[in-house]
Amino acid sequence: MDIAALLTSAGINITVCVVLFSFYSVLRKQPSNVNVYFGRRLASQQAKHIDLCLERFVPSPSWILKAWETSEDEIMAVGGLDAVVFVRILVFSIRVFFIAAVICTILVLPVNYHGQDRIHKNIPFESLEVFTIENVKEGSKWLWAHCLALYVITLSACTLLYFEYKSINHLRLLNIFGSPPNPSHFTILVRSIPSSSEESYCQTVKRFFSHYHARTYLSHQMVYKTGTVQKLKDDAEHMCKVIRDVSVRKTCKSSFGPCCYPGFARNSFKKISSEMDSMQGKTAGYNNMHLETGKKDCAAAFVFFKSRYAALMAAHVMQTSNPMLWVTDAAPEPHDVYWSNIRIPYRQLWLRNIATVVASIAFMLVFLIPVTFVQGLTQLDKLQKMLPFLTGILKEKLVNRLVTGYLPSVILVLFLYAVPPMMLFFSVVEGSISRSARKKSACCKVLYFTIWNVFFVNVFTGSVINQLSVFSSVTDLPAQLAKAVPAQSTFFTTYVLSSGWASLACEIMQFFPLLCNIVERYILRHKEDALNGNLSFPYYTEVPRILLFGFLGFTCAILAPLMLPFLLIYFFLAYLVYRNQIINVYITKYDSGGQFWPIAHNTTIFSLILAQLIALGVFGLKTSTVASGFTVPLLIGTLLFHQYCRKRFLPVFKSNSAQILIDMDLRDEHSGRMEEIYEQLRSTYNQPGVTEHASCNHECCGLHLGKASGESSEDMEKGLRKEITQKNRPRPVQRSLSLSSDKAVLGVN
Amino acid sequence: MDIAALLTSAGINITVCVVLFSFYSVLRKQPSNVNVYFGRRLASQQAKHIDLCLERFVPSPSWILKAWETSEDEIMAVGGLDAVVFVRILVFSIRVFFIAAVICTILVLPVNYHGQDRIHKNIPFESLEVFTIENVKEGSKWLWAHCLALYVITLSACTLLYFEYKSINHLRLLNIFGSPPNPSHFTILVRSIPSSSEESYCQTVKRFFSHYHARTYLSHQMVYKTGTVQKLKDDAEHMCKVIRDVSVRKTCKSSFGPCCYPGFARNSFKKISSEMDSMQGKTAGYNNMHLETGKKDCAAAFVFFKSRYAALMAAHVMQTSNPMLWVTDAAPEPHDVYWSNIRIPYRQLWLRNIATVVASIAFMLVFLIPVTFVQGLTQLDKLQKMLPFLTGILKEKLVNRLVTGYLPSVILVLFLYAVPPMMLFFSVVEGSISRSARKKSACCKVLYFTIWNVFFVNVFTGSVINQLSVFSSVTDLPAQLAKAVPAQSTFFTTYVLSSGWASLACEIMQFFPLLCNIVERYILRHKEDALNGNLSFPYYTEVPRILLFGFLGFTCAILAPLMLPFLLIYFFLAYLVYRNQIINVYITKYDSGGQFWPIAHNTTIFSLILAQLIALGVFGLKTSTVASGFTVPLLIGTLLFHQYCRKRFLPVFKSNSAQILIDMDLRDEHSGRMEEIYEQLRSTYNQPGVTEHASCNHECCGLHLGKASGESSEDMEKGLRKEITQKNRPRPVQRSLSLSSDKAVLGVN
């Protein structure tokens, strides 16, 4: 592949991007698309009315300006900490690759270009390989330039990583401390409650926590089974109850007439009904409530505590001497709960975990088949041998350039679109209890997958077994990589061009929602905005994408510096596009609190280590002992830096610190807000499909609740009424948190 | 090597063992050796007077009977849970290798022996290789026997492991619940206290904990610097003080005469003395106490809490948002504290950890040199080529047998004696805060070391680089092992004979203490028992030894079943010898609470997995697809079993459960023992080298102490007096815990 082919590819991509961005700037002005491009604004009722005028059909760069001007505080208010972290990853990439691009263009590129003593062709017809490290001759004294560039890149990356980690750490703490009272801080999730023949799960939970956490236990809420079968059963029970009530009222008979009921499972109905009868005596006065008592509760419950610190404690400590019983975890935020996974018996989880890992690895290996095919396209001569009838077409220059420079990436991208849903499915099976944890887990899986499939598989072309055999000889890995990576660097350059730039254009165009919208509006002629507020930011696809390009950038920086300008443009476009999307399109339903940063940090460190290993291999192949000698301390230094960051920053992302929670508790106690918070707590965790969650509380916990917070039954009724009004209220996503305030309160160093 | 050579080796070893055991039975009856062989009994004042009669000089098996008859309750009372766990490891080994020996002798040995169609020699002249799996011909249909034996061994080992883990788990819980109030349950160790220019560490600790843990904080005790330099400085200060006191009393001058003091560092003395002066005003009435206030405190402290649960909480939760500050850990038991490591700045620890790992690996690799030499001895023909002058001697049959059957193991054993002290040193450098944690860490290191050096290095004979290259090709490992292990199984058989049996004889003879005793008594003519009570059980050398033999047994069981009877005898002897030593010799100063069991469990699982991998390789080499097909599910099953045990049992060994601690708190509260326990707490953590630990308490914490437990100053003085009387009392090692009681109270399932 020569410079001309690369420029063809770049030209196509630039054209596509410019066209699509112009289209976008027009489409976004159309009132009919407002629910596609302004979903978030619609949801928060801020969308302004757009007039019908000529301006609507003229492309304009106004959205770029808006995206550029938005401050971090606004992003935080609109998209939560996750959005800020995402933008920070982009900013970090721009910074570090700017430095890399400068040093590599000044220092490495000339060394590569003049590496061999030969007469150079005209630049456009120069092969791309002339610009890679492959062109440097063996034993060259100029390899110190590459080593120096590696040092500069590593040191700047580590410095930037450190300050970013520190700052995001600080933001996270501010976010926790400055946000309004979060019910999840007062709540733990208890799973694997031991079953007992004498009492229900609800009673067991109450007994356990009011004995062992008497001073801090507030109340609890059971998790119910709400599968389809369970629903049918519940409906049947409900019917049975209604019919019985009617028949009791009408005929005043207390015994069951055998013909009153629909035929099936009569005996079980009888049993349940007689149980209900006995309960009815106890819970007289709740005429409609006890309809729900037949609902089966799972061995899981949310337990509420009187202070954040107590909940933290209970979540972190093994409750009983059997670690498989009374398993406690910090509860996710109410909107973040993944209800169907909470109902999974805890004993299955470790098996599910193992099964998911095995399935993911199997999926990664099966996926090699399309990738191997794609790889074939970049080596046209092989393809011509396999499919001789193509020879005629492939001889045409434009077709040749298209096929080698563009097609492989497109095919790869199309295949890769199938991966995230699959990985998300695996993460669901795994049993994550929160949506954000599920997406984080999927993000890691997609990341491993893309790095494996885009990088390693392309580098070590061949069958599955060949690729595995590369990894089986660990000590030879640097040398193998050193041979293979520079050869593949042109492919990665085109990959950045095609996949990277095109993905941004697709992202901003929102093809799928746009299509749906058109179908809805003009074919089905629906009036309502069906898509309104349904889209949340797909971090699990976008974070791995960004990190993959960073990974390619680090590993190829000193080997094929020609990639860096394209990468820099990609990151800059991404910065604009994603900011625009965060502001206008995506709705933040739940926030993981910046959990994506540690992933980004680890990936960057891994990229640096791999880049150093490859450099070590290359320096070895080129017999430059000085350069390899200098790379080893860099490698050790990077590993030590990583270890330090793990010790210093990571624990904050794993759990909250006692100090902050106690400070928050004290603040709320002094301001007298605690009672109000307790009141709110009871109504926050609403299980979908369970119409009246309070049934258990009335049965076994009402007494305790009243006692705990010292309130009368009137208060309780008031609470219930409040609850009902709150239930359908959308969650307040706008956080009015100013990042610059509260710093003095927190005193984080 | 043939059967005759093996029997020669066995004969020598049996003779040595019988002679040494007889010697022991005589020597132990001599009054002069009572402090060598009855150290523990002497310490607990139970040694009976031995009469001078003829019986003293006749060997007798009475010690064997005594060792056999001692019950587990007695072992628990005498040696703590660690001793029970150690005996359990032996019992487990005896059981599992009994099953293995039976199945392998009945099933595997005949298959191996008749594996090839050839005329057998007389059994004594039969080569040992005829009894190994090497003798089975390729494609044999009898390999299902080996596969079946592997199944039986794995299943019985897993079943036994499960029940042992469960039972030891139970014992550990009983031990925690049934023991007298343990000060370490109320205490946490805080390290990395942030330094402040305004207040001392002591004041910082007090401020922090009385603010954030106001309800549960009791008091604290600083850790002081007591290095040699610090001691010299302290002594100088003390001298200065004494001289000043004298001079003040004599001349009634308050200013310092420049000639009163020894010359060096006068200015610093002046400064310190003036500080003391100012403090003297505040703490009037404690005339001698303030001598110690000049002692520098470290950024570490023991903090006492009012309940066990509160201490558990504080130990497990990140205190502040900077995880490198206010690092909390559960405190070790008072006698278990490793004081000099507590003073290590916490920031060094992660670096020390990495350095220790690197150093241990380096040491393991350097140690290959003697091992390679030893390995040369078993291949005599090679040695004869290298050293031709030996040919004459080596041709003699007895010398040949000695050299091939005995000498290599002896040399290896001698070299291995140097390893445990080295690993213990590494564990000290690593920074373990307790003696038991240090020994546990050393135990793991010694274990890795011995398994690596005895097994892998002997299997893959050759230079360091050759051995590493074996591991670099991971996928070939089973095949490589399958080739190498059966060939080396004869060496391992002799290793069990020589190293195993001889080590037991050495253990019971206690050569080194015996020699010291003789030198003391008959050459230096000392009268006191210098050794009395100095020996604690060296778990970090004995646990790895036992586990190594188990490891060899599992890996060689189906390959060379001839080893199993010798191994069984070894374990049986070990059972008797170690029980005797626990009862009579070793003193239990601290107890890790059965922490050695998870190590034993993991090692056994590793041994099983490796045995299965080797079997897989062997079946592959012998082209028996059925047998290899059946081994794969066994491998997966074993891994799943291990994962289950990790989930089910391991957490109990990592931390205490809330339920048990709260139950204990409630029990003590109801019985009104809490005040007494608080009283005791203040005097338990006595730092050696710090004569009066209470100095800090008087300075900044006395007020809080009094307030916290609501006691008057009279009570405090009473407490101090009690403290002094308790200080020199030996630790109560006898636990009167009956294992069968308390089960109902605990209700563990």
Image: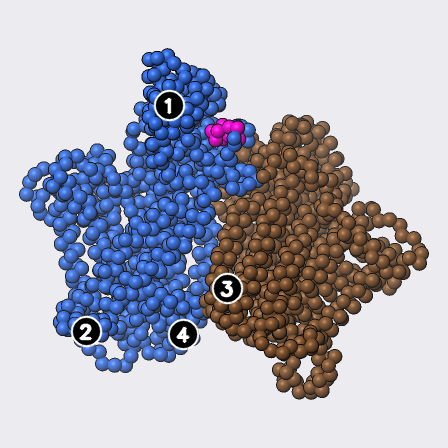
Chain colours: A blue, B brown
Q: Which residue is mark 1?
A: A291
Find out whether residue A272 is within the magenta segment: no
The chain that hosts pointer 3 is: B
Q: Which residue is mark 2?
A: A388
Which residues are drawn in magenta?
A: A198-209
Q: Position of residue A194 (x, y in %)?
A: 51, 35
Residue A572, picture quadrant: bottom left
Q: Nearer the viewer, mark 3 or mark 1?
A: 3
Q: Disc 1 marks which amino acid?
A: Leu
Q: How many marks?
A: 4
Q: Which residue was labeled with disc 4? A: A620
The subunit carrying tag 1 is: A
Name the kind of residue labelled 2 in the image. Answer: Pro
Local packing at callout 1 (Cα closer than 10 Å; few below 14, some 14-19, many 20+) is some
Instruction: Name the one closer to the observer, A51 or A634.
Output: A51
Q: Secondary structure at mark 1?
A: helix
Cβ atoms under marks 2 and 4 closer than 8 Å: no
Q: Position of residue B384 (x, y in %)?
A: 65, 84
Name the residue at 12% across, 37% down.
A525
> Do tag 4 and tag 3 residues touch (Cβ < 8 Å)?
no
Under mark 4, the amino acid is: Gly
